[in-house]
Amino acid sequence: LYLLRHGEAKPGIGPLGDLKRPLSEAGEFHINQLSKVLESRKITFDLILVSPAVRTSQTAKILSKFVSSKEILVLDEIYDAELNDLVKILNDVEGGVQNLLLVGHNPSLSLLVSYLTGIGSLSLNPGMMAIIESVSDEWTQIGKYTGILKEVISPRKRLSWRIHIFSAFLAQKKRFLIRKRLLELVFRMILRI
């Protein structure tokens, strides 16, 4: 699962202005850089899901010049989506899809990363991508703590995403150790009874 916040956009006014905000020059540049990284890794997508906002459509269009995809779908539900809306969208993905890219918006996209992986402090800046490995092969099983954050790519700040990954790894390891200790305590209590 690949979650990408759209590239940096030009300012807009009001809801209609927000929906029609295009990428800024810097946003286009950063998405081009990200696309080249994905191309060098030979990453392809079975499905790209995109918000109807101009900036997300432009982001997906730039990506598709470098990275192939079998299908691109524009879903109105992604724009202004809440966390539960995004989870439902993922749960409704058909079974044959292996590599999925969701191009969307904050705060829901960052909340989705936290929800799936348990990492609470990660905020995706414009143009940042989170790569999450699911513990299940079924999209219907995607839910809380069902993902492992593998990488965060930010073409603007290479060092920062490495720091994010290290801190994300530590947070996941700490969460695992806490769960393990809690289970050990529960088993000890059961054995005493």
Image (cartoon, rainbow, N blue to C red):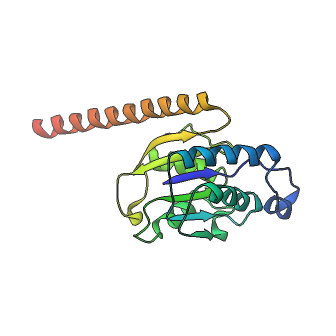
Q: Position of residue 157 (x, y in %)?
A: 65, 32
Q: Report the number of discs.
A: 0
Q: Position of residue 21 (x, y in %)?
A: 82, 57
Q: Position of residue 23 (x, y in %)?
A: 79, 52
Image-based side of 98 in relation to 19, left or right: left
Question: Which residue corresponds to the image point at 21% horizontal and 35% vertical from the top-left?
Answer: 184
Q: Is residue 101 above or below residue 154?
A: below
Q: Quadrant of the C terminus?
A: top left
Question: Which residue corresponds to the image point at 62% horizontal and 54% vertical from the top-left?
Answer: 66
Q: Is residue 157 above or below residue 48?
A: above
Q: Quadrant of residue 164?
A: top right
Q: Nearer the viewer, residue 140 or 26?
A: 26
Question: Which residue corresponds to the image point at 42% horizontal and 61% vertical from the top-left?
Answer: 98
Image-based side of 138 in relation to 14, left or right: left
Q: Nearer the viewer, residue 14 or 70?
A: 70
Image-based side of 63 in relation to 87, left or right: right
Q: Nearer the viewer, residue 81 or 8?
A: 8
Question: Which residue corresponds to the image point at 50% horizontal and 50% vertical from the top-left?
Answer: 42
